[in-house]
Amino acid sequence: MCGFRFSARRSMKLCKTKRCRNPKPHWRRFCRKCQWRQLKERDPLRYSFYHLKNRAKQRGHEFSLTFDQYKDFALKSGYFERKGKTAESLSINRIDNSRGYHADNIEAVTLSYNSRLKYAPIPQWLKDEILGKSKAASAAAMERGAVVGGC
C-alpha cells in the first residue's frame, strides 16, 4: 500500500482558524462557530442583534426590529453597556407578551425585575394601559358588573 492510508478527515474541508478542527462548507474559509466568534469580536452590537433575532425565531416570536432601531434602543437605554447575567444586568422585556419584538413593544429592564414579571400576574388595569384601553372603558365595564380584575 506504499504507506498511504486514506482518511476521511483529509478529504473533508476544515476551518482555517488556528487550532479549530471543525468542518466547514466548501465555499467558506471558516466554520459557523468561528464566524460567530469573529463577528462578536469585530461588531458586538450587530452580534447581539442577530443573537436576539435568532432566539426570537427559535421561540416563535415575531421580530420586526431593524438593526438601526435596535442600535438606537440599545445605546439610548444603556442596554448594550449593561447587558449580562447578573441580577442588575439589563435584559429586553416585551411590554405586551402577545406581540413580538417591535420597536414600540420593547424596554430594557433588570434581569431580576424581568424574572419577577414571569411569575407575577399582571393586574387588569396594567393590561388595559398596555393595550391602549382607556380607564373610562374599564370603569364602564365595572359599572356593568363585568369582572375586570380576573380570578
Image (spheres, grey):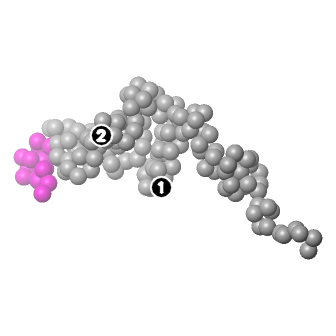
Q: Amino acid at mark 1?
A: Gln
Q: State the CA–CA distance, disc 2 to disc 1.
A: 24 Å
- 139 in the magenta segment: yes
118 vs 18, left or right, is left
Which residue is disc 1 drawn over? 58
Foreground residue among 30 and 69: 30
User: Residue 67 in the image: x percent, y percent?
Assistant: 53, 35
User: Residue 62 in the image: x percent, y percent?
Assistant: 45, 49
Question: Could you say whether the residue bearing mark 2 is in a helix, strand or loop?
Answer: loop
- 61 in the magenta segment: no
Task: Name the residue rendered at 43%, 55% in the picture.
Answer: 59
Foreground residue among 144 and 14: 14
35 vs 14, left or right, is left
Q: Of callouts 2 and 1, which one flags the residue occurring earlier in the amino acid sequence?
A: 1
Is disc 1 surrounded by few (<14), some (14 to 19) or many (20+) residues within 10 Å? few
**Please, which residue is most extreme toward the right here?**
2
The number of numbered badges drawn on the structure is: 2
User: Residue 111 in the image: x percent, y percent?
Assistant: 31, 41
**Residue range highlighted in magenta:** 137-151
**Please, which residue is most extreme toward the top here?**
76
Which residue is disc 2 drawn over? 87
The quadrant of the rendering that contains the N terminus is bottom right
Task: Name the residue rendered at 53%, 34% in the picture.
Answer: 44
The quadrant of the rendering that contains the C terminus is bottom left
Residue 133 appears in the rendering: no
Question: Could you say whether the residue bearing mark 1 is in a helix, strand or loop?
Answer: helix
